[in-house]
Amino acid sequence: MDAEAPATIALASARGRWVLAVTVLGSGMAFLDSTIVNVALPTIGRDLGASTGELQWVLSGYLLTLASLILLGGSLGDRYGRRKVFVFGAVLFSAASLLCALAPSPGALIAARLIQGVGGALLTPGSLAIIEASFRVKDRPRAIGAWSGMTGVATALGPLLGGYLIGAVSWRAAFLINVPLGALLVVFAHHVPETRDPQAHGRLDFAGALLAALALAGSTYALIEGSQGASAFAIAVTGGVGVLAFATFLRVERRAASPMLPLNIFSSQFTAANVLTFVVYAALGGMFFLLVSFLQISLGYSPVAAGAASLPVTLLMLCFSPSSGTLAQRIGPRLQLSLGPAIVALGMLMMTQIDGSSSYLTGVLPAVVVFGAGLTLVVSPITATVLAAAGESRAGIASGVNNAVARVASLLAVALLPLIAGLTGTKFYDPAAMTHGFHVAMLACAVLAAAGGAYAWRAIDNDVLASRTRAQRAGEAVPEEITPPVVACPLPLQPTPGPTRTQRTRA
C-alpha cells in the first residue's frame, strides 16, 4: 500500500475507484446474503427437514449477533483500523458462509449463521467509514452516491440471483457465492488506505455488547421456542434472563465512561423517531419474512419468480427515495411519516386477499406496488428525522442506534409472527395453513404499520428538520443520506449517513 494520506483521495483517481470497488464489494456481500436467504428458506426447510422454529432461527441467529455487535464493530474499526476490521469481518463472514453451505443439519446451519452475524457486525460499519475517512471532502457526496447506487443494484439483483442459484444448483450455492467474493475483497483490500480515529480512547464496552446479546437471545428464545412447545420453565427462565440482561444493560450504559450506547442521545424527537422505526420495521420485517415463502408454498412460485415478485419495491425505492427526502426537508417529515405507514398498511391489507387463484398481475403486483409506494414515503424522512434530532456531531452514533433498532424490530417480528399466525411445527410447509397464516400475519402487520403512522402524527415535530434545512441553504455540511445494510429483507431498508470523523460510534 502506498503512503497516500487518508482523506486526500480523489474519486476520479485509480486509487479512488479501488476504494469504492472494495467497499461496494463488502457491503454487496451482506446485501446478497440477506436477500438470498429469505428466498431460500422453504428449500432449506425441506432439504434439512427443519421445523418452523428452526427456520426462524436461521434468520434470527444472524440478526441477533449482528444487532448486538454492530455498534461495537464500528468502535473496533475506529480504534484498531477500519480496513483491518473490515477485512477481518469479510473473512469471518465468508468462512461462516462456507460453513452454512456445508451444514448437514438445521442446528449446524443456525450455528454458522450466528458466526456470520459476527462477521457482518464487523463488515457492515466499515464500508461507509472507509469512504468517509479516505476521500476528499468535496468527493465524499459523489462517492457515497455511487456506493448507494451500486449497492442498490446489488440489492435489486439479489432475489433474482438467489432464485436462480437455488433452482439451478442448490440453496447451498446461495451461501457459497460469498466465498469467492470474500477472497476478491481480501486481495483488493491493499488498495485501501488504513485509517483510525485518533480520538478513540477509553475501554471498549464489551460488557454492554455481551448484555445486549443476552437480552436479545433470551427474549428471542422465549418467543420462538414458546411457540414450538418448549417447557414453561425454560421459557420463563430464558425470558427472565433477557429482561434482566436488558435492565442491567441500561444500568451499565448509564454508568460507563465510554458506553456503546450513550443514553443521553435520546431526546424526545430522537426517541420518537426510533419508536416509529421499531414499530414500522417490525411490520416490514414480518412481511418480508413470510411473503417469499408464501408465494412458493401456497402459490407454487419457483424460487426465482418469488424473488422477483418484490422487485418493484426495490425499484420504487431506488427511483423515488431521494425525492421523498427532499420533500420532507421542504414541508417537514410529519405528513410522510404518518401517511407512508398508512399506505404500507393498505398494501398489507391487499395482500390478505391473495390466494391460490390470484395471478401476479392482478393480485400480487398491485399489493406490492402500494406497499412500495408507502415505504418510499417513510425511509428517507425517518432517517433525516433521526439525524436532525441527534445533531450533526452525533450522526454516526445516531445512525448506528437506528440501524440496531430496525434489526431488533425485525428479529422480534420473525420470532413472534409465526406464533400469531399459527405457523408452528410443520404447518409452515402446508399450502392451506400457510395461506391462512400469511393472511393473519399481514393483518397483524397492517395494524402495526397503521399504529406507527398514527403515532408519528402525534409524536413527530414537523420542525425537527428546520435546522438541517437552514444549514443546507447556508451551504454548511450536513450528513449524507444513503442506502444502508439490509434488515433481513429483499431491499435496503435502513439508511445510514456518512459518519463524521470523530463522532462515529465508539465504545
Image (spheres, rainbow, N blue to C red):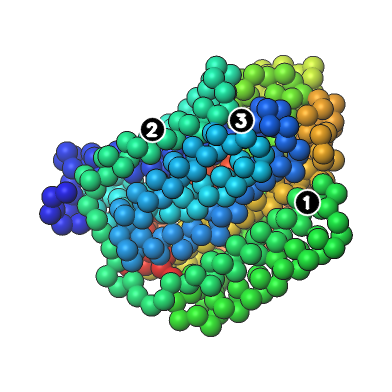
Category of crowding for the residue at label 1, using alpha-carbon neighbours closer than 10 angstroms: few (below 14), some (14–19), many (at least 20)? many
Q: Is residue 266 above or below residue 149?
A: below
Circle 2: residue type: Pro
CA distance for labels 2 and 3: 21 Å
Residue under the image location 64 percent in, 64 percent down? 214
Disc with the residue nearer the chain's start (2 vs 3): 3
In the image, 6: left or right of 42? Answer: left
The circle drawn on residue 52 is: none
Q: Secondary structure at mark 3?
A: helix
Category of crowding for the residue at label 2, using alpha-carbon neighbours closer than 10 angstroms: few (below 14), some (14–19), many (at least 20)? few
The circle drawn on residue 225 is: 1
Category of crowding for the residue at label 3, using alpha-carbon neighbours closer than 10 angstroms: few (below 14), some (14–19), many (at least 20)? many
**Snapshot quadrant of residue 334:** bottom right
Residue under the image location 53 percent in, 53 percent down? 66
Q: Is residue 165 above or below residue 93?
A: above
On the image, the x and y values in percent for residue 465 come to: 47, 60
Residue in front for this viewpoint, 47 or 478: 47
Q: Secondary structure at mark 1?
A: helix
Residue in front for this viewpoint, 188 or 28: 188
Q: Which residue is mark 3?
A: 39
**Snapshot quadrant of residue 213:** bottom right
Q: Nearer the viewer, mark 2 or mark 3?
A: 2
In the image, 171: left or right of 435? Answer: left
Contact, mark 2 vs mark 1 (Cβ under 8 Å): no
The circle drawn on residue 180 is: 2
In the image, 168: left or right of 338? Answer: left
Disc with the residue nearer the chain's start (1 vs 3): 3
Instruction: Please say whether residue 98 is visible from this viewpoint.
Output: yes
Q: Is residue 486 above or below residue 462?
A: above
Residue in front for this viewpoint, 324 or 65: 65
